[in-house]
Amino acid sequence: MSKKDTYLITGGCGFIGSAVIRHLLKNNNNIVINIDKLSYASNVDAVEASEGESYIFIKDDIINKEKINEILMNYSPDYIIHLAAESHVDRSIDNPLSFIESNILGTFNLLDECYSYWKNLEKKSKDKFKFLFVSTDEVYGSTTDESFSELSPLRPNSPYAASKASADLLARSWFKTFNFPIMVSNCSNNYGKWQYPEKLIPLVIKKCIQNEKIPIYGNGKQERDWIHVDDHVDGLLSILDKGLSGQKYNIATSKEKSNLEVVEEICIIMDDLKPNSSNSYSELISFVKDRPGHDFRYSINTDKILNELGWRPTTNFSDGLRETVIWYLNNQDWLFDPDKISYNGDRLGHLTE
């Protein structure tokens, strides 16, 4: 009987991390170790699995180097997928320090401990080991006409993006300096179930249910590439399976939509699924002052992952969005439960006037 593959997932109770774990646990030959500090946006229920032989949850912070070392020694993972991060741009404006600590120092600690673990492995295990750092397209900054490739310079414009770009560079340096088998992915905006309702799509759904104003920054024409979280997970696992050490891979759909278009489409779906007797939900749209340093357009080129790894997204945005709205309507406790949700929907990211 072949040895089971062991995965260490950091931030596995978060939106994307939990989707990765749900996918991995479909294979009975996988063992998943999940370390998550359970910050405000995490939820143990999102994994949709109980602890047992194949799934182990450890509540701790990647800032804790001793705990990381203990996990590596006790479970001998073959693969690391590093997702633990603070990820909300507006919160990075209010409190940059937490982003520096989690996204830069936390990544350093993990790299440092994993390198020490890897270099002492036997050759067969050492050759098998891979580390995947999951990053964002926001590290490239804003663009007007072009799409960013993996060779584009990093030009982050928010404390969040700067913290992720710093971690990208740390990952690169561990490969260049130590030949550590690491890969980096940079992905566009995700959507799907279990996303914390400070993010655009679940927030809009929540506002519609409450019949409250839907705030849109500026004129709403900011463009984003939206990918279903399950497609993102497929891309990550393709990189882990077929990607080359030291390489970066962009993940996206290459189909951009403005924020206003996304909000209007949600309103149309809500009009159909949960009609408001007094008005269309689109009448709740309210334009508010733009946030500081708001990037106008993100666009990334995905030729590399398409051509070299054969990955491509499969979820149509309108179909995926409708499925997502239905999930939130059927799981409103995730939007409203005060024991799970510490965010009341008010705007974040103000600068002191």
Image (cartoon, grey):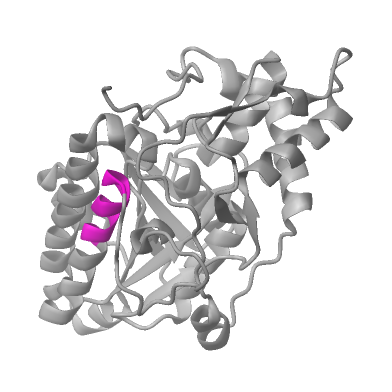
Residue appearing at x 38%, y 27% in the figure:
40
Q: Position of residue 113 (x, y in %)?
A: 13, 59
Q: Answer above or below: position of 27 versus 331.
A: below
Residue appearing at x 41%, y 45% in the figure:
294
Residue appearing at x 34%, y 60% in the figure:
139
Q: Position of residue 286 (x, y in %)?
A: 62, 25
Whether residue 49 is visible? no
User: Of helix, strand and loop, which mostly describes the magenta segment?
Assistant: helix
Whether residue 43 is visible? yes
Query: What is the number of callouts on the image?
Result: 0
Q: Nearer the viewer, residue 295 or 239?
A: 295
Magenta stretch in the rendered image: 158-167
Q: Judge from the rendering whether residue 139 lies leftward or rightward of residue 121; answer left or right.
A: right
Q: Judge from the rendering whether residue 218 lies leftward or rightward of residue 260; answer left or right.
A: left
Quarter-wise, where is residue 333 in the image? top right
Q: Position of residue 193 (x, y in %)?
A: 62, 40
Quarter-wise, where is residue 230 in the image? bottom right
